[in-house]
Image (tube, rainbow, N blue to C red):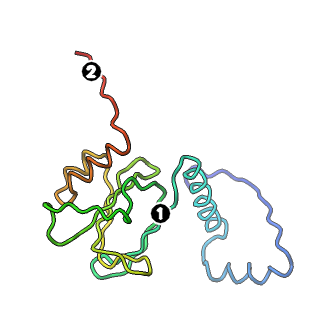
Amino acid sequence: MENAMAVNATLYVRDEDAAVWDRAKEVIGESLSSYLTSHLRSIVNSDKAAANGNERILLRFRENSLPKQVAFNGKWIIAPEARFFQDDWDESRTYTALAITAHNRVAVFRFDGQKEDGTFPGARLTSYDTFEMANMASDVPSELIANAMEIRGIPVEELDI
């Protein structure tokens, strides 16, 4: 174990819950401590993200015909509901949405439409380090990036000239 620190924590389980804990040990197959820590980390990260104005974004879609679900903490700058479409860019009627992740990455979500159940039948999620890197991608409309940058606010570049 890397950087492991021994911490003793005692968890008291009610008698009526003992069978659940015993079965969980069998089902999980790994240490309950690791399993619980993973879930606690997710809860703490979500709480920290929410404190910074982020939310848990859950996307359910089909990618290469296979169902997929992904979630991340961030905030939509241009949400899927906005149905961003650039007429002169893509004749297939592909929509694009853009979020900023809790790690300050640019998440671009491309989709063909949305079903009544909230799923996206044909979609792809890609993340980039910066707006500029997203703009260099051939399948990301420049107008989407420009709009998102304007909505978020353009930082002033201080020049020493």
Taking the spot 37% from the left edge, 65% from the top edge, the residue there is: 80
Crowding at dot 1, Cα within 10 Å, few <14 / some 14-19 / many 20+, comes out as some
Q: Where is residue 94 in the image (x, y as percent from the top left)?
A: 23, 69
Q: Position of residue 88 (x, y in %)?
A: 13, 60
Taking the spot 65% from the left edge, 82% from the top edge, the residue there is: 26
Callout 1 amino acid = Ile
Q: Residue 79 carries which label?
A: none
Q: In which quarter of the image is residue 31?
A: bottom right
Residue at mark 1 = 57
Q: In which quarter of the image is residue 161?
A: top left
* 136 or 120, nearer to the observer: 120
Callout 2 amino acid = Leu
Q: In this view, does 110 lie above or below 100?
A: below
N-term mark: 1 or 2: 1
Q: Position of residue 34 (x, y in %)?
A: 62, 65
Q: Residue 159 carries which label?
A: 2
